[in-house]
Amino acid sequence: MTHPFELVQEIELAATPEQVWDAIATGPGVDSWFMGRTELGASAGGSAHLTMMGHTQQATITAYEPGTRLATRGAEAPDGRFMAMEYLVEGRDGGTTVLRLVQNGMLGDDWETEFEAMKAGWPIYLETLRQYLAHFAGRTPSVTTAFRPGAGGPDTIWKIVTDSLGVTPDIREGDPVRLPDGSAGVVYYANLPVNLGVRTDEGLYRFIHSGTARGDALVLGHQNFAGRDEQAAWDTWTAENFA
């Protein structure tokens, strides 16, 4: 059985509408703050595909108004499930821009868990967008996504993650950390036991606990603006720490 839903998020960004548009309406721009790899056309009717961990979610651009509005709609599943996205860009006085995101569609039987996961997930991605525009605007990263199913409950996951960063689970935004590779960073988003964001001089990291009816998992996202491919290193880290 399907269930309709709608989720609305809004953020004010210290960037021009043109910068924000490039970050939400081009594949390299989206790759700089979101998950996986995105392919985006440049007109209504074009493709809007997201590929992550070998799976591609196919969507179509339903509205394309440069600098103002972008909307997409995912393919509909046999049971009627689908997702649609709309981004609205509005410039403000003082050189800032407001980005409003509306996500809606139909979810399946586990719709409440899916909805809560999306509701908890969007703030860290939008804050990652803010960090990208403030510190790495215009640069294209290499993107790593590491997924470890069966990682354990939130207490187990966050004890391992925070120990690896050299901090405690009561970590706060602005706290300094040290990544497993030895690089120094600072926390830009802290919402444990759900997710954690870290920025270094070379990139952006997200650690996300995903709890679903299928069990607990850790998802790691990393944008490396130094251009290095670190997929193997983070796959090894998750395998060693979350057997």
Image: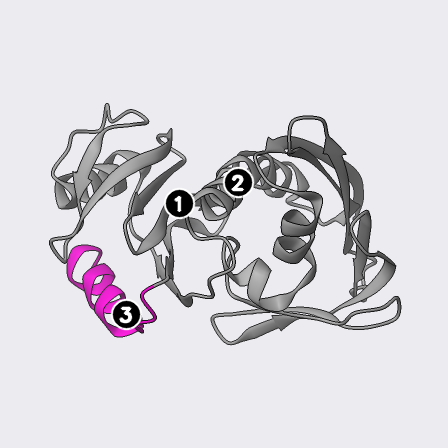
What residue is shown with label 1? 208
Between the C-alphas of marks 2 and 3, the distance is: 23 Å
Q: Quadrant of residue 38?
A: bottom right
In the rendered structure, are the residues bearing label 1 and label 2 in contact, judged by CB atoms less than 8 Å apart? yes
Looking at the rendered structure, the secondary structure element under dot 3 is: loop
- Where is the C terminus found, in terms of image quarters? bottom left
Looking at the rendered structure, the secondary structure element under dot 1 is: strand
Magenta span contains residue 231: yes
Task: Name the residue: 74% across, 35% down.
Answer: 91
> Above or below — where is 85 with respect to 127?
below
> Above or below — where is 173 with respect to 1?
above
Q: Amino acid at mark 3?
A: Glu
User: Is 46 on the left or on the right of 14, as rendered?
Assistant: right
Q: Amino acid at mark 1?
A: Ile
Task: Name the residue: 50% across, 53% down.
Answer: 137
What residue is shown with label 3? 230
Q: Quadrant of residue 198?
A: top left
Q: Residue furthest front?
A: 94
What residue is shown with label 2? 121
Stretch of the chain drawn in magenta: 226-243
Q: Position of residue 39 (x, y in %)?
A: 65, 72
